[in-house]
Amino acid sequence: MLDWRTKLEIIVKGVKGNVRSYRKSGGGPTGGVGFEIEGSIVSAPNKQKFVENSPYKIERIDERYYLFKNDEVVGEVKLPKAEYYSKPTSFGIEAGRIVALDGINALVTAVSRKCVLWRGKKCKFCSIEVGLKNAIVEKTPEMIAEAARMAYEEDSSRHLTVTSGIMPEKDRGVFRISKVVRAVKREIDIPVHVQVYAAEKDLLELLYESGADTIGIHAEVLDEKIRNEVVPGKPKLEEYFKAWENAVDVFGKWKVNSWVVLGFNEDKVKTAENVRRMVEIGVTPFLAPYRPPPHSNEQPVNVSEIAKIYELVERDVKRVDINKAEAGCFTCGGCTAVKELIAKR
């Protein structure tokens, strides 16, 4: 695998090169390209203006692709292919507009691209409602199941993440997501990861019974003092710890993860302390540097500051069993260098 510091620098500074970006919009990091190098899956900024200053570039030489840092070869690159993107579904919509490809083999779909927090209490890093004019805003279980089957039949190494904006219903969208999982599992035997709000235990059990293999409950910020600035519409951290404990009871250790978005001047020590608490209950922390979206003029976060947090959590994250993640963001690992940190010898 890549050295974790190298990986961190790539996913912060980005990669130049005329490479196809399959995942163009949504709630997670956008404007990136996915590839595999030295056994590491990477999802790096590519469409952002700041990438012009990156020392990294993908170049094609004799029908092969290589990643360079300035004039030095880092390694040969494997790029994803997704022919299913252009194939029409029975709904008259191309499959790639329903289920996107991220990283190398991570499929992702949003049941709803609407979020109740978007107006008034939007998360600082979120782009879920950007570009809705060209999106399928609301998707049915049948649409997602058919598109996922087409993508999976093309490459059976793929896994699926089912996410959504926070819905207005009392269950915050858990029922709709569970119906999607059931529909997908009826079509194909693909590992499925779900991402939901800090739900009650009975709703977590519903998701597990529907066939979800792993789950993400994303606190995003582990420094309580800045949560109101970065994620103003979300609960306090203790509610997440309660939800994580319930999720581990239902899904098992290391099958529960949480995005932790870094780069908002969070308290490093407090963040590391809460990473330790997460690991102690069997939750995998997905430590990802904030990636500004292409439509913004923001600069990338400070790599050195993010690296300091990685150094603080190294001993704790090495306790994570990375083989337990069957599907989802941690299985891919493109937006974080935690897998590389764990693999460090």
Image (cartoon, rainbow, N blue to C red):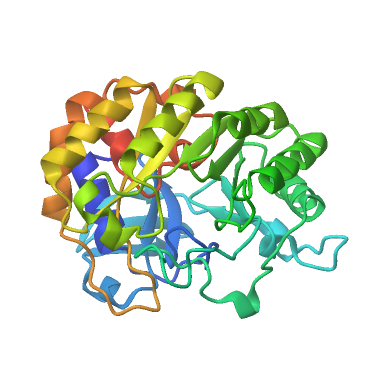
Instruction: Return the residue nearer the eye: 343 or 165.
Output: 165
Q: Is residue 23 left or right of residue 271?
A: right
Q: Is residue 48 left or right of residue 307?
A: right
What is the count of numbered marks?
A: 0
Residue at x 42% of width, y 60% of height: 29
Residue at x 33% of width, y 34% of height: 339
Q: Position of residue 344 (x, y in %)?
A: 23, 28
Q: Is residue 309 left or right of residue 237?
A: left
Farthest residue, direction front: 170
Residue at x 41% of width, y 30% of height: 242
Instruction: Return the residue nearer the eye: 246 or 62.
Output: 246
Q: Position of residue 140 (x, y in %)?
A: 77, 56
The quadrant of the rendering that contains the C terminus is top left
User: Can residue 305 be seen?
Assistant: yes
Q: Position of residue 305 (x, y in %)?
A: 12, 52
Instruction: Return the residue nearer the eye: 76 or 96.
Output: 96
Residue at x 40% of width, y 26% of height: 322
Farthest residue, direction right: 90
Query: Quadrant of residue 57 in the image?
Result: bottom left
Query: Quadrant of residue 330 in the image?
Result: top left
Q: Position of residue 267 (x, y in %)?
A: 13, 48
Instruction: Return the residue nearer the eye: 125 or 289.
Output: 125
Query: Quadrant of residue 312 in the image?
Result: top left
The quadrant of the rendering that contains the N terminus is top left
User: Can residue 81 be seen?
Assistant: no
Residue 54's place in the image compared with 40, above or below, is below
